[in-house]
Structure formats: structure tokens, C-alpha cells
Image (cartoon, coloured by chain):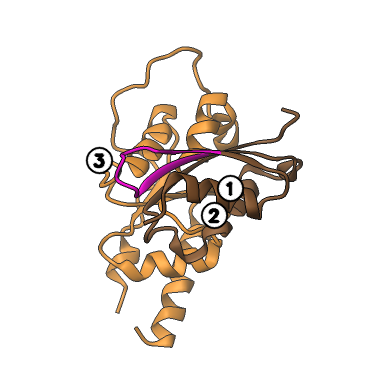
Chain colours: A brown, B orange
């Protein structure tokens, strides 16, 4: 089971110049909220921004990571 | 599931997305959502009083896989408007709160109005038939 730190690390490693805050919403390691800030999101529709975050985890979404709530922003917003 | 029944299911899903200007793929029904994310999403639509079609993906797990292949989005719920994926619970909620969802759906959103009690959507009957046609 991933934990908040690992999720944060993986997002920050995959999304250029990003900083991520990850909360484990249930304490059970299966429902997280990630707030990701990166200028890599600039100009992209929310859908595209969220897809970039989902893509970090690929097939794990819906499995080991049961639920991932996402909030994305650019640094300049 | 055979390749041809997968292809058939995919076509049915794509048809439903084409035929309904607002369609929500969710867990459970608008009257009885089965998960919090689906509940939140359908609640936003109901608050706006916008007509929409709803497909309960729970009875047929294969729908989820084919839908995700079509939309390139891994989770449920998924809201499509005019054939385009708008997003899941997070995006729909954000857009609802900012007023963007009302704009996209072409409905009015009263300022500071409390969300009305969830009601059964009037027009745009749910294409539940999609489940019944599965082989």
C-alpha cells in the first residue's frame, strides 16, 4: 500500500518542477487527496492536468490506490 | 468477454455518449448513488436542475474498462457533455462551485442558493437500456 510520502515523491519525480501535498483522508492508505502545483499545468484543461497526475500511477489507480482526489494549480495562479 | 462483444459494448457506450448531450457514468443511480464521488457528482447536476442521462456501471464491470479505454480516464464517475469528457468528481465539483458547470450545461445557477433536495431528473431519461443489451 502506498503512503502519502511515497505518492508525494512519485508525483514530484514525474511532473516537472512540481510540489505536491498529499493527505491520507481515511488513515487507511487507500484514499488520498493530492494538491499539486506546477507550471507544467499552464494552459492545460483541468482534465489534462488531472490526467498527468493519474498517469504517474497508471494501473494502480482504482486498485492499490483506491481513490485519489486531485487538485491542480500553476505556481502563478 | 470475447473481443467482438467488447467491441460491441464499446460501440454502445460511444453511441450513448453521442445520443445524450449530458451523460454521467456513475456507481449506483441518481436516486441511490453507491459511492461518495458519484453522489457528489450527481448532486451537482441535480442542484442545477439540468437534465441528464445516467448509466450505472456497477451491474456490468466490463463497462468500466471499455469506458476508460474510450475516455482515457481511470475512475468513475465520468461526466460527458456534448460528446466530450468534462471530468470526474473533483473537476465537476470545482466547476459547480465556480459557476462553470452551469455555463457548460446551459443552465442558470442562483447565487448563494442552498442545494435543493435531490430529485429524479425529468427530461433525458437514463439510457438504462445499455445494460439490458449486453450479451
Chain where mark 1 sits? A
Q: Would you place residue B132 above or below residue B52 in this image? A: below
Q: Would you place residue A61 above or below residue A4 in this image? A: below
Q: Which residues are magenta?
A: A21-34
How far is mark 1 from mark 3, CA to CA? 28 Å
Q: Residue at x 56, y 53 (%)?
A: A10
Viewer-closest of B5 and A44: A44
Name the element at disc 1.
Answer: helix
Residue A15 locus on image (x, y percent) = 67, 51
Label 1: which residue? A50
Viewer-closest of A60 and A44: A60
Badge 2 local density, few (<14 within 10 Å), some, or many (20+)? many
Label 3: which residue? B31
Name the element at disc 2.
Answer: helix
Badge 3 local density, few (<14 within 10 Å), some, or many (20+)? few
Quadrant in the rendering for residue A41: top right
- Is the residue at mark 1 from the same chain as the one at mark 3? no
Residue B94 locus on image (x, y percent) = 53, 32
Residue B67 locus on image (x, y percent) = 46, 64
Answer yes or no: do the residues labelled 2 and 1 have beta carbons within 8 Å? Answer: yes
Q: Quadrant of the N terminus of chain B?
A: bottom left
Q: Is residue B65 one of those drawn in magenta?
A: no
Disc number at residue A54? 2
How many badges with numbers are in the image? 3
Q: Is residue A26 one of those drawn in magenta?
A: yes
How far is mark 2 from mark 3, CA to CA? 29 Å
Q: Residue at x 45, y 34 (%)?
A: B50
Chain where mark 2 sits? A
Q: Is residue B50 left or right of residue B106?
A: left
Nearer the camera: disc 2 or disc 3: 2
Amino acid at each position: 500500500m502506498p503512503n502519502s510520502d511515497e505518492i508525494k515523491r512519485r508525483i514530484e519525480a514525474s511532473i516537472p518542477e512540481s510540489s505536491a501535498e498529499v493527505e491520507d483522508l481515511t488513515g487507511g492508505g487507500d484514499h488520498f487527496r493530492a494538491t499539486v502545483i506546477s507550471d507544467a499545468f499552464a494552459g492545460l484543461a483541468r482534465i489534462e492536468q488531472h490526467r498527468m497526475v493519474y498517469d504517474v500511477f497508471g494501473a494502480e489507480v482504482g486498485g492499490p490506490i483506491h481513490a485519489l482526489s486531485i487538485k491542480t494549480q500553476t505556481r502563478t495562479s | 468477454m470475447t473481443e467482438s462483444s467488447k467491441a460491441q459494448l464499446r460501440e454502445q457506450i460511444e453511441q450513448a455518449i453521442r445520443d445524450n448531450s449530458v451523460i454521467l457514468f456513475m456507481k449506483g443511480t441518481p436516486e441511490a448513488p453507491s459511492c461518495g464521488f458519484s453522489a457528489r457528482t450527481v448532486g451537482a447536476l441535480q442542484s442545477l436542475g439540468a437534465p441528464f442521462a445516467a448509466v450505472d456501471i456497477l451491474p456490468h464491470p466490463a463497462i468500466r474498462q471499455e469506458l476508460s479505454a474510450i475516455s482515457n480516464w481511470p475512475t468513475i464517475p465520468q461526466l460527458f457533455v456534448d460528446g466530450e469528457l468534462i471530468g470526474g468528481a473533483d473537476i465537476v465539483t470545482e466547476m459547480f462551485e465556480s459557476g462553470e458547470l452551469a455555463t457548460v450545461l446551459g443552465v442558470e445557477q442562483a447565487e448563494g442558493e442552498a442545494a435543493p433536495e435531490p430529485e429524479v431528473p425529468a427530461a433525458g431519461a437514463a439510457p438504462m437500456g445499455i445494460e439490458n443489451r449486453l450479451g
